[in-house]
Amino acid sequence: MIIISDVKKSFKDQEVLKGVDLTIRRGETLVILGRSGGGKSVLVSMLVGLITPDEGRIVIEGQEVTQFKDEKEWNRLRLKMGFLFQGAALYDSMSVGENIAFALRHHTKLSEEEIEGIVAERLKWVELEGIEDKMPAELSGGMQKRVALARTMALSPKIIIYDEPTTGLDPITSDTIAHLIARLQREFQITSIVVSHDIRTTLYVADRIAMLHEGKILTVGTVEEIQHSPYREVQEFIHGPRRSKDRNS
C-alpha cells in the first residue's frame, strides 16, 4: 500500500502540489489523470525519491520515505519498484539484452546463465523474443517501450510506475502497451500507478482513477464512477468541453 498525505511542492513561486491526499491499494492499477503541467509527473517522481516534497508524508510498503536520511534507504526500496519512463530511457550504447540484464548484474548474484534466462523470459513476455542482440536505435518507438517494460520487470518489482506510457505512440501500439500493463497486473498482482492523459488507455487498464486538478486530488473512483462523475472538470477531461456541456444540459 502507498499512502500520500497532504503532500505539497513548489518550484520557486509556482505552487504545483497544494496538499495531495491519495491511497493506492496493494495490487491495484490506479491511473492519475490531469492536464499537462499539472503535477502528475512531480507526484510520481516523489514515489521513487527523484523529487522531495516540501511538506507532507509518503508511506510505501510500511516505510515513511519522507523520513529517509540517505540514498541507501531509497536504493533498498527501489529494488522493489520499477519506473517506466515516458521516453523509454534505454541505454543507447547497450544491446537490448544488456539493457534488461543491467539491474540483474548490479543487484543480484545470479550467474550469467540465469541472467540470460530471465532476459529471454522477459522479452517473451512482452512479445519480443530473440532480439537480445539488437540495439535500441534499430527498434521502433513501440518496441523500445516494450523493451523498457521488460527491463522494468527484470527484478520482479512489487510496484511499477508508468509515466505517460503511450505518449507518442500510434493507437495500435498504444493498445499493445495498455494490454501488457493490464496483463502484468492481472498475472502478477503488481501495484501499478499510471500517469496518463490518454483516456482510451486509462479506461482499459484502470481499477481506479484519481483526477489531479489545480494541485489537489479532485476525486477518486472506479472507471464507472469517474465516467459518471458530477464534477464538470472530470467530464470535460474525459469527453471534451462541448460534449461535457451537452451531457450536463
Image (cartoon, grey):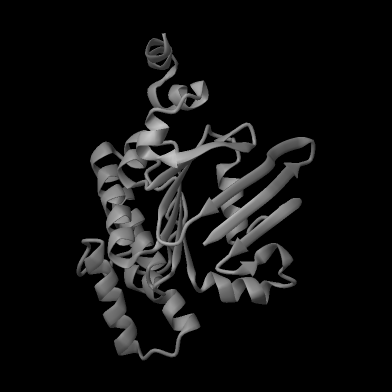
Point out the residue furthest to the right here: 13
Q: Would you say 125 lies left or right of 99 here?
A: left
Tell me the residue at 22%/63% (across/down).
Answer: 128
Q: Nearer the viewer, residue 123 or 65?
A: 65
Q: Would you say 110 lies left or right of 73 here?
A: left
131, above or below 166, in the image = below
169, above or below 92, in the image = above
Tell me the residue at 34%/83% (across/down).
Answer: 115
Q: Nearer the viewer, residue 179 or 105?
A: 179
Whether residue 91 can be seen here: no
Placement of the C terminus among the 4 image quadrants:
top left
Q: Give coordinates of residue 31: x percent, y percent.
A: 44, 45
Tell me the residue at 33%/39% (across/down).
Answer: 203
Q: Give coordinates of residue 226: x percent, y percent.
A: 42, 33
Q: Give coordinates of residue 200: x percent, y percent.
A: 32, 36
Whether residue 125 can be seen here: yes
Q: Would you say 115 lies left or right of 162 here?
A: left
